[in-house]
Amino acid sequence: MKSSSSSRGDRRLSILSGHLAPRTIDKEGSGIFCSPTSAADSVFANVVRAPEDPILGVTIAYNKDPSPVKLNLGVGAYRTEEGKPLVLNVVRQAEKLLVNDRSRVKEYLPIVGLADFNKLSAKLILGADSLAILGNLVTTVQCLSGTGSLRVGAEFLARHYYQRTIYIPNPTWGNHGKIFTLAGLTVKTYRYYDPVTRGLNIQGLLEDLGSAPSGAIVLLHACAHNPTGVDPTLEQWEQIRRLIRSKSLLPFFDSAYQGFASGSLDEDARSVRMFVADGGECFIAQSYAKNMGLYGERVGALSIVCRTADVASRVESQLKLVIRPMYSNPPIHGASIVSTILKDRNLYQEWTLELKAMADRIITMRKQLFDALRARETPGDWSHIIKQIGMFTFTGLNTKQVTFMTREYHIYMTSDGRISMAGLSSRTVPHLADAIHAAVTTIA
Amino acid sequence: MALRTPITKRFISSSHASRSISSWWKHVDPAPKDPILGVTEAFLADPHPDKVNVGVGAYRDDNGKPVVLDCVREAERRIAGNLNMEYLPMGGSNKMVEETLKLAYGDDSDLIKDKRIAAIQALSGTGACRIFADFQKRFSPDSQIYIPVPTWSNHHNIWRDANVPQRTFHYYHPESKGLDFAALMDDVKNAPNGSFFLLHACAHNPTGVDPTVEQWKEISYQFKVKGHFAFFDMAYQGFASGDPERDAKSIRIFLEDGHLIGCSQSYAKNMGLYGQRVGCLSLVCEDEKQAVAVKSQLQQLARPMYSNPPVHGALIVSTILGDPDLKQLWLKEVKGMADRIIGMRTSLRENIEKLGSTLSWEHITNQIGMFCYSGMTPEQVDRLTKEFHIYMTRNGRISMAGVTSGNVEYLAKAIHEVTKAA
């Protein structure tokens, strides 16, 4: 050791004297300190404040509003008729079982997560009788909800796939683009929503995917497209499938609403199963945030359907290398709840009923809003409200109209005109209908 | 109509499903097993009755059983039947973050009062380090990270995946099985001004070798001279000495000297919340405005990775730390865990010495925290595994948490057997 006691003494004196000297902070913020012991400039002095997330920012604004009639139709979290968040009965039961099981510990899960959970999740999306599962062609890893599943899948693609371009629908969930970009993929869009019909622009979709380079990745919303609520019909899905397979495009499904859209888990999985049935490969991101109400627990799964079991096994080993330096292994609580429910026949049954009830309530809200606008003779065709499916309705309102509705009626929604139907109740539908009516008749 | 792609020469008929197509992933190599987590997998697969797992750093009680702390059970009881499981904000639970900052920076920290710390809830220590590494890449794109030799193997993976170039600095001194302080200081002095350094706040993993208070002060001073950035990975606060305040001493020294540090905190070990993935990433800024800006940017990195962090573990932490009685219970339980480990260190050393080993084993009791860097070679470790069914990482790192009064003699015997002169 090199330090001598005298230099240590000098240093101590200088530290002490430093405390006695006043700190000078440059008012312009360059942070120049004259004391030898004070901080140098921050290495991050150049960091500017990031813009608010457009979706999560809506709730922040809503929370600040003191109005008693305010309505939060922003973020897609389910609400009851009473406007309250909902913890499903089966989830409460599952939690109780877990808490009372003293033999359970909180050790690290494996990198790929809870094995039971993974198997059950694959079965849920692919079907209990899936040949792909039977043939061990599927690797499933637990991830942090839909976001985490998409990110891990995208990172794998950026490392191991020869095509670095992903096509995402226009419009799509605001976070999709960022996820893929940060993972190292190039993002392009394909036409999806037709503002004139407020339905699917199937021609545009087929043209754009048709001109994509062979092998490009294609993001598909399995059901209940976010934000538009516009889904292809089964016939249209078949057209899309043929095109994708004929060009060797790689489908990447985002399944965030299985069971939530139609009320039937199998029905909402049909698009995915159609693709898997033709023997081709695909990626699937699943989320339990909405259909099990486990939002904050961050539960999801990434499944990759491969051609052979050997490939699936190697792919899984490489997924671990993506996950380990990101967060090592996934959180245990939410996955344990899901696993408990999915493997118990009674709990599973009960879950399907609770799920159907949530989906039915939303469908009812659609009907009520549509009727309310018709009763007010609000100009325009509002049938898309009952044609669109899932949690969201793309109203077709423009940014100015949205701003008006927020200002005058305290309606909080994203500026693209998307409303979360889950945030409505029979009590609040009239207020929303009034707001839409006023916006449409006041502002072009 | 048949289509042929140049890459795989696949033939696609529009009327058939793509049955004859080969996989896109044929070229994917099987990945090597994680050196640490692979050890437990091997241990679990071993049927031998005397097998011992001193591999992964998860605490065990004296019966070799994993532990759920009483304060955690009580907290879980209280939060069961929770009103909702809604999304946390992107930055996580504010309450949990506030309590966590107090642990690292001090209850009365001016930095906290002045709101100068940008902090987000993170996915345990790994997640905190990764978000920091991504942030470093984005906002100091020309910087590199200096990493001690040796370090937790995943540190290298984290900064590599964040695309931050890595350099190393001397840390462990194999001859003394202690700190190579002179070489460390040389590396600090020779690094270009304003370099980024990764420091283990306490209980260095894997060596268990920590600088003394005096040495930390010198390191801090030299960092000032060079204008270096210090990022502390604190995964074992409370676990090292049994006293969280004492274990945060290195950080407090740097703060006293005015450094604007970064810090990763984990509750995996000290609250036994391993699988819940609860931690915190914090960055000290010049003022509140900068802290707000930095936090918003940290959130921008979290959003496309996992949107917002898991709520359950955070609730457990804030329930415990927010209740004075539960917090006291936690402190008592942490001290209990640390004391058991310190006791096992003494016991292991004594047992090996009792067997007449001519080697020095004082490093077992000099080192601190969960791990002991035994100094054994990979070949000796392999013998331990093959002949004695003792599982540890091949760098000779022993997780003391896996040592019990029931297996310490067996372990000592085995270690003596493979290390004694032939």
Image: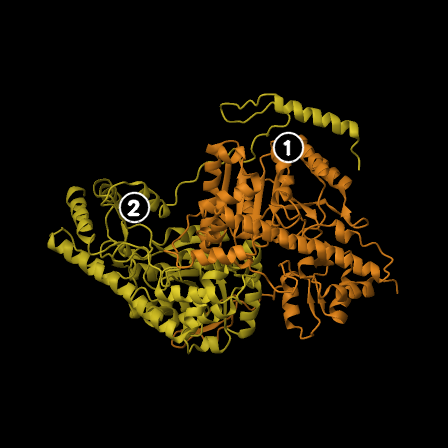
Chain colours: A yellow, B orange
Residue B95 can be seen in this image = yes
Secondary structure at badge 1 equals loop
* Of A78 and A279, the residue lying toward us: A78
Residue B158 x, y percent position in the rendering: 59, 51
Q: Exactly how many numbered labels are in the figure?
A: 2
Residue ID at (45%, 58%): B77
* Of B268 and A439, the residue lying toward us: B268
Check disc 2 and report the residue beneath it: A415
Query: What crowding class fits label 1: few (fewer than 14 Cα within 10 Å), some (14-19), or many (20 or more)?
Result: many
Quick check: A414 above or below B85?
above
What subunit carries mark 1?
Answer: B
* Of A213 and A160, the residue lying toward us: A160
The quarter of the rendered structure image containing the N terminus of chain A is top right
Residue ID at (60%, 63%): B66
Asked which quadrant contains residue B86, the reply is bottom left
Which numbered dot is residue B142?
Answer: none
**Relative horizontal placement of residue B75, taking residue B363 as reference (left or right):** left
The quarter of the rendered structure image containing the C terminus of chain A is top left
Asked which quadrant contains residue A404, the reply is top left
Residue B151 x, y percent position in the rendering: 68, 51
Identify which amino acid the numbered label 1 is placed on.
Gly
Identify which amino acid the numbered label 2 is placed on.
Ser
Discs 2 and 1 share one subunit: no
Check disc 1 and report the residue beneath it: B227
Residue A102 x, y percent position in the rendering: 51, 66
* Of B394 and A63, the residue lying toward us: A63
Secondary structure at badge 2 equals loop
Cα–Cα span, label 2 and label 1 = 45 Å
**Relative horizontal placement of residue B227, taking residue A391 as reference (left or right):** right
**Mark 2 or mark 1, which is nearer to you?**
1
Residue A303 can be seen in this image = no
What subunit carries mark 2?
Answer: A
